Image (cartoon, helix red, strand yellow):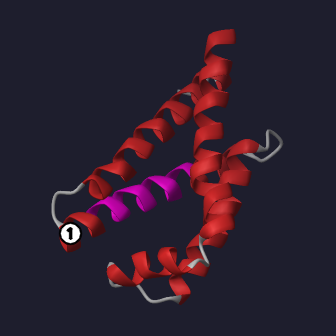
Amino acid sequence: MKATKIIFWVSTIIIFLFEGVMPALFSQQKESIEGFTHLGYPVYFVTVLTVFKVLGTLALIIPQVPKRIKEWAYAGFTFDFLCASISYFVVDGIVFFAFFPLIILAILMVSYFSYHKLNKTV
């Protein structure tokens, strides 16, 4: 049980840092906006996605958040990572940036399954 808690918190904190803290700090920088427009997304989408990412990571990291909300956050991040990867594959071809969201998705899945193992709902 202790190992599962450690795995859950480490993986969830990694997601929190990559998808909550970093977008909150860097999403409005020129390079970030250029990255989104390079993929064909409108500039306003940067702000919308950042707000949802921060809210989603808060839902995952705060223990008092209801389980149903956490499930939606996990689902939202799954769609986000899959769509990010597809966007990079379509626009840039086979490059590291196309695989990076899938790596983060794997970390998200570790968090998800350890969350369910801790809550005995799998």
Q: Nearer the viewer, residue 62 or 98?
A: 98
Residue 59, given in percent of the width and then of the height, sits at 72, 51
The reply, left or right, for residue 67 in relation to residue 104 is right
At 79% across and 39% down in the image, what residue appears? Answer: 63
The answer to whether 98 is drawn above or below residue 115 in the figure is below
Q: Nearer the viewer, residue 49 or 24?
A: 24
Q: Is residue 77 magenta?
A: yes
Q: What is the span of residues highlighted in magenta in the rendered image? A: 74-86
Q: Which residue is mark 1?
A: 92
The reply, left or right, for residue 25 in relation to residue 112 is right
At 33% across and 84% down in the image, what residue appears? Answer: 40
Magenta stretch: helix, strand or loop mostly:
helix
Q: Evaluate whether residue 1 shows in this view.
A: no
Q: Nearer the viewer, residue 29 or 77?
A: 29
For the view shown, which residue lies furthest in the right direction? Answer: 64
The answer to whether 18 is drawn above or below residue 80 in the figure is above
Q: Secondary structure at mark 1?
A: helix
Residue 21, given in percent of the width and then of the height, sits at 68, 56
The answer to whether 2 is drawn above or below residue 26 in the figure is above
At 61% across and 80% down in the image, what residue appears? Answer: 47
Q: Residues within 10 Å of mark 1 (few under 14, many from 20)?
A: some
Q: Evaluate whether residue 97 shows in this view.
A: yes
